[in-house]
Image (cartoon, helix red, strand yellow):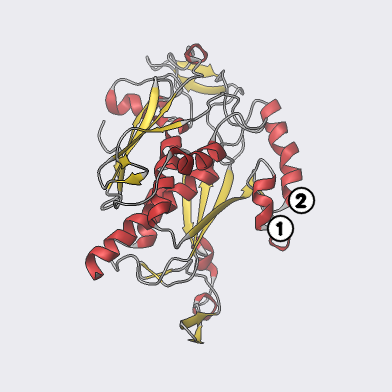
Amino acid sequence: MSHNSFGHLFRFTTWGESHGPAIGAVVDGCPPGLALSEADIQPFLDKRRPGTSRFTTQRQEPDVVRILSGVFEGKTTGTPISLMIDNVDQRSKDYSDVAKAYRPGHADYAYDAKYGFRDYRGGGRSSARETAMRVAAGAVARLVIHEVTITAWVEAIGGDAIDPANFDLAQIDQNPFFCPDAVAAARWEKLVDDARKAGSSLGAVIACEATGVPAGWGAPLYAKLDADLASACMSINAVKGVEIGDGFSAGRLRGEDNADAMRPGADGPEFLTNHAGGIAGGISTGQPVLVRVAFKPTSSILTPVETIDREGNATEIMTKGRHDPCVGIRGAPVVEAMVALVLADHKLRHRGQMG
């Protein structure tokens, strides 16, 4: 299977399976001389790590990262940076039924149809376990875009959205949902608990904002910044939709309502609104870059679902094991990482073209 790499000048490749001995990433194109240690990466992995609350999978993985190459005396050397995390809490026996029949909504059938063979233990490469290495690579990318601050939060779970009037960035790290609305976070406790106890799951919407992105990153046609952001976020497991700025809501507006009016400012134009999400014509405008990502409900559930086995016979399946009742909760750090990786790549591409 090819296509395990993402990016151009700042490029990363992930490897490993959910129930293999380890997972890893190779980050290539990182400039030399940047201070980097495991301590710079670990805090981001801890945010994504499973088993941190009853609202996520109870698989107990410490997700301790090791840097195997590309760093000397605490500084990046400009050579490939190899990162690795050991898998320590696999329970492959939970997937005996998955070996015989396909989980609807998961990649089981699609993998079999393409390759004629699949690793049914946790989904192999299709498992969200792989996203830990995206987060690790994203931590390296943040060193390249030191001028940018990236923050993601959960905007809705199971259709229950936050109240913008209650938005408080300080709340994001104060609850297990990455939620900026304390009132909504309290509601979500029961919502997610009820879904878990019922053997079901819930979808979620993640919003991510990158501030400090200067005007000029991106290109007008085949290297649009928003197109690369959409591609990066759509590549995340369980993501089914991506919006930039107002996204689909822009389709319901009039031209004068959608336009981001400008006025003269001390350091360039001052925008009165940000419907475009900080990107116009594929190029950043200097406004905050805003991405919104929709995660589907976790496909591995205890509720019986009609399916077929590998021989094409009708059957039912319920997935045992430890699974997120809402995979979107742990999606916030992953979205942050993918945004960081795209922005780092575009910063280097801009510098390469414009000097």
Mark 1 closeness class: few <14, some 14–19, many ≥20 residues within 10 Å = some
Q: Quadrant of the C terminus?
A: bottom left
Secondary element under disc 1, as helix, strand or loop, is loop
The image shows residue 256 at horizontal and vertical percentages of 52, 81
Residue drawn at 66 percent across, 40 percent down: 176
Q: Residue furthest front?
A: 73
Q: Judge whether residue 296 can be spotted in this image.
A: no
Residue ID for mark 2 = 183
Given the image, on which type of amino acid does mark 2 rest? Val
Q: Which residue is nearer to you in this view: 351 or 185?
A: 351
Residue 225, given in percent of the width and then of the height, sits at: 36, 61
Q: Nearest the camera: 126 or 201? A: 126
Residue 51 picture location, percent across and down: 60, 28
Q: Which residue is mark 1?
A: 163
| Furthest residue toward bottom | 264
Decide: is 79 above or below 194.
below
**Camera-side residue of 201 and 65:** 65
Taking the image as drawn, is residue 14 in sight?
A: yes
Disc 1 residue type (three-letter): Asp
Q: Secondary structure at mark 2?
A: helix
**Left or right of 55 in this view: 75:** left
Q: How many marks?
A: 2
Q: Are marks 1 and 2 in contact (CB under 8 Å)?
A: yes
Q: Position of residue 340 (x, y in %)?
A: 42, 53
The disc placed on residue 348 is none
Compared with 237, 75 (above or below) is below
Earlier in the chain: of badge 1 and badge 2, it is 1
Q: Residue at x 46, y 33 (%)?
A: 128
Measure how far apart labels 1 and 2 are at the Cα level: 8 Å
